[in-house]
Image (spheres, rainbow, N blue to C red):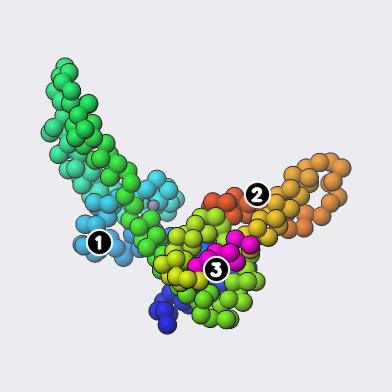
Amino acid sequence: MKEKIYTIPVNEAYDKDCECPMCLLESNLEKEALEYNLGAAMMEEDFRGYSDKTGYCNRHFGKFFEMPNKLPLALVLDTHMEEVRKELGKVIKKAPKDGAKSGLFGKKDGFAKELKDCLQNIYDGCVVCGKINSTMERYADVLLYMWANDDAFRQKFDKSKGLCVKHMLLLTDTAPKSIGSRANEFLGAMARKAGNEFDRIQEDIHRFTLKFDYRNKDMEWGSAKDAPIRTMEKLSGYIKDTDDEEL
Ligand SMILES: [Zn+2]
Ligand SMILES: [Zn+2]
């Protein structure tokens, strides 16, 4: 049996009525990781060394900035910036002098490439994304395992509103590794469900547009009131925090 620390959250997420249980799990992971990075991790030397080198992406810097206390953020930025300057400094030492016209920029391993690699490393790394991605892979593996081996879970999966495109992609990648010969059976079920759920989402978003026609002003909203956010989240993964849906 798979470890309970993964099976329990996946089961609980499938008990909630939502557009994508994997989004619910991811949103909770993100919240935890953000709080940890500017909280308990501040005192952990090894972790700080890793976060100083790795840094954070644009989305997660933005999330940090929304947090009320700016001192932990500034402390993290201060030591991360030191690392960034160290790495950039190594490249700067090899920078062509003013007026140099040699083929430095044309050479395959020339300065341009080194500079690009250095900037790419600074830009790409994100401690929070790294944590989320590795845990979501475990959740995907566990979801597939339970779908293949646990009838009660399979019923929950069949009753659910499906998944968003982002997490269907994750499961498409994970299924052959996790459940081997049963992957296609799962992917077929997942795709058929997506087809039905997308029909429902289309009805909601279309109803939303009709509601703005004065002739329809007395029409019931039905389930269309929050259709724009649900449609975007179905297509691209969660956008809104799920504060009221903590697991
Ligand atoms: Zn999702
Ligand atoms: Zn990130």
User: Does the closest atom of ligand 1 sit within 8 Å of the Cβ of label 2?
Assistant: no
Check disc 3 and report its element: helix, strand or loop.
helix
Task: Decide whether residue 189 is among the magenta residues.
Answer: yes
At x 77% / y 54%, what residue is drawn?
Answer: 221
Give the image location of residue 167, x and y in percent. 51, 59
Q: Which residue is mark 2?
A: 228
Specify the quadrant of the image occupied by residue 112. Answer: top left
- Residue 23, relative to residue 98: is it above or below? below
Q: Which mark is residue 47?
A: 1
Q: Is residue 126 left or right of residue 4?
A: left
Which sits earlier in the primary sequence, circle 1 or circle 3? 1
At x 21% / y 37%, what residue is drawn?
Answer: 114
- Residue 111, relative to residue 190: is it above or below? above
Spatial CA distance of label 2 from label 3 is 29 Å
Specify the quadrant of the image occupied by residue 36. Answer: bottom left
State the quadrant of the N terminus: bottom left
Q: Are marks 1 and 3 in contact (CB under 8 Å)?
A: no
Q: Which residues are magenta?
A: 183-192
Task: Decide whether residue 84 is among the magenta residues.
Answer: no
Q: Is residue 74 visible?
A: no
Check disc 1 and report its element: helix, strand or loop.
helix
Amino acid type of the residue tagged 1 in the rendering:
Phe
Amino acid type of the residue tagged 3 in the rendering:
Phe
